[in-house]
Image (cartoon, rainbow, N blue to C red):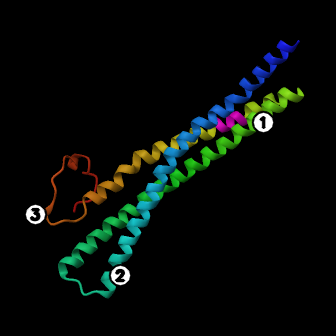
Amino acid sequence: MATLESVDIIHLFQTVIVPVLMISGIGIFILIIQTRYGRVVDRIRSINNERLKMIRMELTGDLSDVEKKWNYHRLQDLQRQLPILVKRGKMLRDSLRFMFLSIFTFIISSFLIFIEQITRIQTSFAVLAIFTLGMLMVFMACINAIREVSGSFHAVLYDIHTHVPKEYRVKTDLQAWTDDLEPL
């Protein structure tokens, strides 16, 4: 009888560990998304600081015509980048929310499995429903992450194509990819 109890305990641990493994895998995904999110937020702050500095210079300084033209075009490029970055930030924020909520559902699933094994109260339907909800949240987080990665390159292209006089422009192989941007 003692070996049967040991087998039951091993089965209990195996059953309860599955949601815990999901949490571990999601933790790695959260680290990746959090890093991307932090970079987007930092870039938004950087662009906003540059924008405010240029506006302040325009209002308080006596700028040459060349500087005024440069500032005008740079401000336009910054204004185009900000909405893209804000949209990316929202997608990453939502992705993180889905991931943390999925961890919560996996913890509840593991707890319910443990309760079922100890008390023999049927919680199988609740476990299945909550675990499925957690997997759906992971799926939604992945969709948001894919959408964010897909749109991440567009803001960089605005930065590369800041208005520069023709004689100072850098020729790149990116021109074929950037034809959809407004002409400089």
Q: Residues within 10 Å of mark 2 (few under 14, many from 20)?
A: few
Q: Start and end of the magenta stretch? A: 130-135
What whole-number distance in Å separates the C-alpha atoms at marks 3 and 2?
A: 28 Å
User: In this image, 9 relative to 41: left or right?
Assistant: right
In terms of image quadrants, where is residue 133?
top right
Can residue 137 be seen from the camera position used here?
yes
Question: First in sequence: mark 1 or mark 2?
Answer: 2
Image point (46%, 60%), residue name? 41
Q: In the rendered image, which residue does mark 3 sit on?
A: 167
Residue lying at the far left of the rendered structure: 167
Residue 69 vs residue 25, the one in the foreground: 25
In the picture, residue 102 is in which quadrant? top right
Q: Is residue 1 magenta?
A: no
Residue position marked by numbered label 1 in the rendering: 111
- Disc 2 target residue: 56
Specify which label sits upstream in the sequence, 1 or 3.
Answer: 1
Which-is-in-front pick, marks 1 and 2?
1
Label 1 environment density (alpha carbons within 10 Å; few <14, some 14–19, many ≥20): some
Give the residue at x 63% y 46%.
100
Image position of 58 with respect to 140: above or below: below
Magenta part, dominant SS: helix
Spatial separation of the CA atoms under disc 1 and disc 2: 57 Å
